[in-house]
Amino acid sequence: MTLGFDIYNVDFRVWSTLDNPFTWLSGQYKIPNYTCMRESKSVAVLTGISGRTSAQIGTLLELYRFPQLTCGPLDTVLSDKSKFPSLYQMAPQDTSLAIAMVSLMVHFNWNWVGLVISLDESGLWIIPELREEMAKNRVCVAFEHVIPSTILTQIFSSLIIHHEINNSSANVFIIYGDNEYLLNLRLYFGQFLMSSKVWLMTSQSDLSMSRRYFMLGSFHVPLMFSHHHSDISGFKNYVREINPSKYPEDFYLARLWFLSFNCSHSESDCVTWENCPQDASLEWLPGHTFDMAMSEESYNIYNAVYAVAHALHKMLLHQTEGNGKGMVPSPAQLHPFLKKIQFHNPAGDLVILGEKVEAEYDIVNIWNFPEGLELKVKVGLFSPYAPHGLQLSISEDMIEWTIGTTETPHSVCSESCGPGFRKSPQEEKAACCFDCIPCLQDQISNGTDMEQCVKCPDHLYASSERNQCLLRAERFLAHGEPLGMALACMAVCFSTLTAAVLGVFVKYQDTPLVKANNRALSYILLTSLIFCFLCSLLFIGRPNTITCILQQVTFGVVFTVAVSTVLAKTVTVVLAFKATSPGRRMRWLLVSGAPNFIILICILIQMTLCGVWLGTSPPFVDTDTHSEHGHIIILCNTGSLTAFYCVLGYLGALALASFTVAFLARNLPDTFNEAKFLTFSMLVFCSVWITFLPVYHSTKGKVMVAVEVFSILASSAGLLGCIFAPKCYIILLKSDRNSLHGFRDKTYTGRKKPS
């Protein structure tokens, strides 16, 4: 469609009637032949919205260097100046269209979108732009359908589109392409195809033209992106007052009047205007028949007329200054002035023909309730010139969604993962399709759609909802809790009992029983047992560096004293028996007190091991955050495990040596022999610590500390009970046996009488 006009007598009714949809669909403008062009005073040609038609006309106009201004959307083919040097496109460039559409998706949290795009230059251009911008904002393509250009393949394509849309979980689709085909697509499938779907489209893809598509409770929601432009002063008043009587030569205006207002006509096909309503106005017509607002194409025509007028004015001024007055302007002479034209139109917008500026977009929603309203309402604006994050402004409450609901449509492949969950991608699917996996223990996610869970610091733990980290409560084997209190009471009671036994031995130190069992070694053993019981108190209470060091060192030394004393007592029993045999060496060893040196040697060895331990890797205060959920266990770390096991192993070696010697001497026929009691005490001692090792390593936290304390108390109690309980029984309850006469009777009755 083309339009030639006389630039000296511009009539605005030319472009205002072009806004009539019937004109767009039915108008046929023929290209003037060479003779008409040569004789006409026209200096420019305006062509319509079809880029294909403009290209065909442009090829002919280029032969005469005739300026051509296109009013349709920007076409990349027509932008090739090597092919169309005389063609000027009035529409701004759509470099921000993809950003605008994706910004709207992000605003409404739509990340699952279908694409229906025509197979032409504009469609092929926007596909990579959309894909890139969608990938940046984590919006995924549910499906992509490219509309073919041939009519036959379009029929089959319609069936495919119908199937894909109705079987897709996406509720939002981008429509970009040839308007005529989309109108046919809408006509074929109507409500069934687009029910309850949101369609994002440009104004040139508007499906509302001359189509009735309202159905109560089920219709698609169109959101159109149209180029933003200021309102033209007086335009609506002009359209409101226009009628065929004022412009009788406008055939299309007359036909629109005839079809819209039931005017009669005569046999000569001339319209009889008297039968029409006298105050008839285009404002009466519904939105799907005639839109009172200025369309993008009309605005482009408006700017084209002013551009040609400004260029012609400058050209005439240039000719006047060059003494060229009276010369008839040639259309080819207009090009240098059109290329440099830059002005503000009466609406206040800047118009530049030489270079293209980025367009701002009005976001328009079509209100169609009640039926036939077809009211286009501006609900938002996208400006690429605004700061990042403020480019999109939209009024959600003004958008008319599907009938019967005010909720914003939902279009996602997978529902968002809430706090406490992380996204797990689904195999062979888009990034927007994922499963929600709960965070592991002590890991949280406090946002939606988190890629990874975050581990809480050691002093914090994850709540049951896994959405926040909470402060751990400190726990240790405290004196105030039942377990700690019970162990502390046991330690105090056993140490008191041991002290009482020591008091008994001191009181009855001159009795034969005390003398016979080596008074000095008994005192040393009882004293060491008191400290063995009391050293367990170091394990109870809040640990610190000093108590952590004293725990293991004191435990190792005092138990070494106790076990080495038992070994010395056992060796003394053996030497006492051997001393009755002929020879002086055994008697000398017994009288000289050589067994007592065993204690000193054993203590020195153990203290050396403890010194190396403290010098290399001493015990220190540590925390355990894994044993009890929500708690942080404060305990002592042994430091060097090798040193710890060396100290413990040395104690075990001493106990094994004592047990072996006592076991071999258990049946020595002597009145004062206590080897049996020593054997049994070492058996109890070894059993306790052998059991301790697996139990100690199978427990965690403060229970592990309690196991060690219990082992200390049990092994010490075993030594006390097995060695000293029988002696106290005789001293306190059987005093008649604690005398020389009693011992002789016992010795005599214990031996076999001669025959």
Image (cartoon, rainbow, N blue to C red):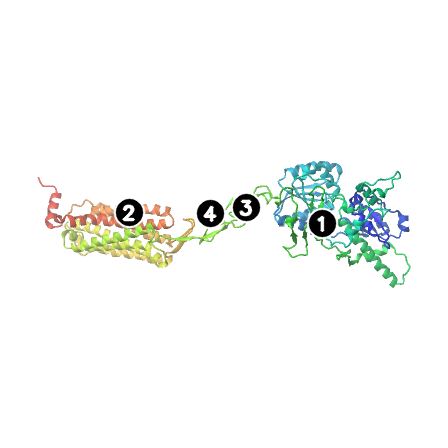
Q: Give me the C-alpha separation between circle 1 and circle 2.
A: 91 Å
Mark 2–mark 4 CB contact (< 8 Å): no
Mark 1–mark 2 CB contact (< 8 Å): no
Q: Earlier in the sequence, mark 3 or mark 4?
A: 3
Q: Give me the C-alpha separation between circle 3 and circle 1.
A: 35 Å
**Residue under circle 4?**
464
**Residue under circle 3?**
417
Asked whether 141 or 572 is in front, the reply is 141
Indicate the amino acid at tag 3: Cys
Q: Looking at the picture, does residue 423 appear above or below residue 546?
A: above
Question: Which residue reaches farthest left?
Answer: 755
> How far from the left and from the top, in percent, is residue 41?
89, 53
Q: Give me the C-alpha separation between circle 4 and circle 1.
A: 50 Å
**Residue under circle 2?**
686
Q: Which is in the foreground here, disc 2 or disc 4?
A: 4
Asked whether 331 or 170 is in front, the reply is 170
**Residue under circle 1?**
226
Q: Count residues near mark 1 (Cα–Cα under 10 Å), then give few for <14, some for 14-19, many for 20+.
A: many
What SS does tag 1 mark?
Answer: strand
Q: Which is in the foreground here, disc 1 or disc 2?
A: 1
What SS does tag 4 mark?
Answer: loop
Q: In the drawing, does residue 692 fall left or right of residue 373?
A: left
- Residue 47, which numbered label? none
Indicate the amino acid at tag 2: Cys
Q: Earlier in the sequence, mark 1 or mark 2?
A: 1
What SS does tag 3 mark?
Answer: loop
